[in-house]
Image (cartoon, helix red, strand yellow):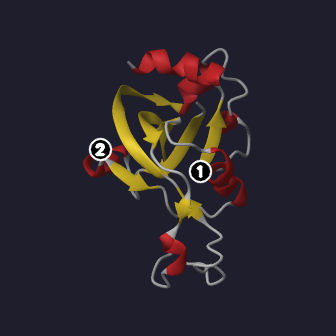
Amino acid sequence: MQYWLLKSDAESYSIDNLKRDKITAWTGVRNYQARNFMRDQMKPGDMALFYHSNIAEPGVVGICEIASIPIPDDTAFDPKDSHFDPKASGANPIWCAVEVKYVKHLKKPIPIDELRKTKGLEKMVILQRGSRLSITPVTEKEWNIIEPGLR
């Protein structure tokens, strides 16, 4: 099993949306490195921290599970969608998505400032200067430091 952090603008798609939907395709990723994580490394059963960005106090708000193998990201084919890519086609989808399944909300969100102060998380990708990826790996050690606080 691998662990991930999935970052979402809370106004675009929040943990509450995922709870309501139960499962959703993680679409709209337009960074090659983040796409490659989904395409090449994510597997059904992997666990992920759901992270709200673009809010007053960004941080981890819940847990979700990777529920599918990579699938084509249909938003790339829709000219009306803000994630449309005219170079993408059915034969060459370029962009992919994975389905993610709601697991739970945290009892209390873990703000990024708290993550920064937590011993053992110093190398966590989300905490690195200039880290802007919407999908980042989380090591088993990092997960094991964070996860007990989520129960």
Q: Position of residue 145 (x, y in %)?
A: 57, 17
Mark 1 closeness class: few <14, some 14–19, many ≥20 residues within 10 Å? many
| Mark 2 Cα shell of 10 Å, populated few (<14), some (14-19), many (≥20) | some
In front: mark 1 or mark 2? 2
Does residue 83 appear anywhere in the picture?
no
Identify the secondary structure beneath mark 1. loop
Q: Earlier in the sequence, mark 1 or mark 2?
A: 2
Question: Amino acid under label 2?
Answer: Lys
Q: How many marks?
A: 2
Residue 62 lies, in percent from the top left, at: 41, 34
Give the amino acid type for the residue marked by disc 1 in the picture.
Ser
Q: In the picture, which quadrant includes the C terminus?
A: top left
SS type, badge 2: helix
| Residue name at image x 49 percent, y 72 percent | 75
Provide the residue designation for mark 2. 19
Specify the quadrant that holds the N terminus. Answer: top right
Percent coordinates x, y for residue 69 in the rendering: 53, 51
User: Is 46 situated above or below 18?
Assistant: above
Q: Nearer the viewer, residue 53 or 105?
A: 105
Q: State the residue position of label 1.
A: 134
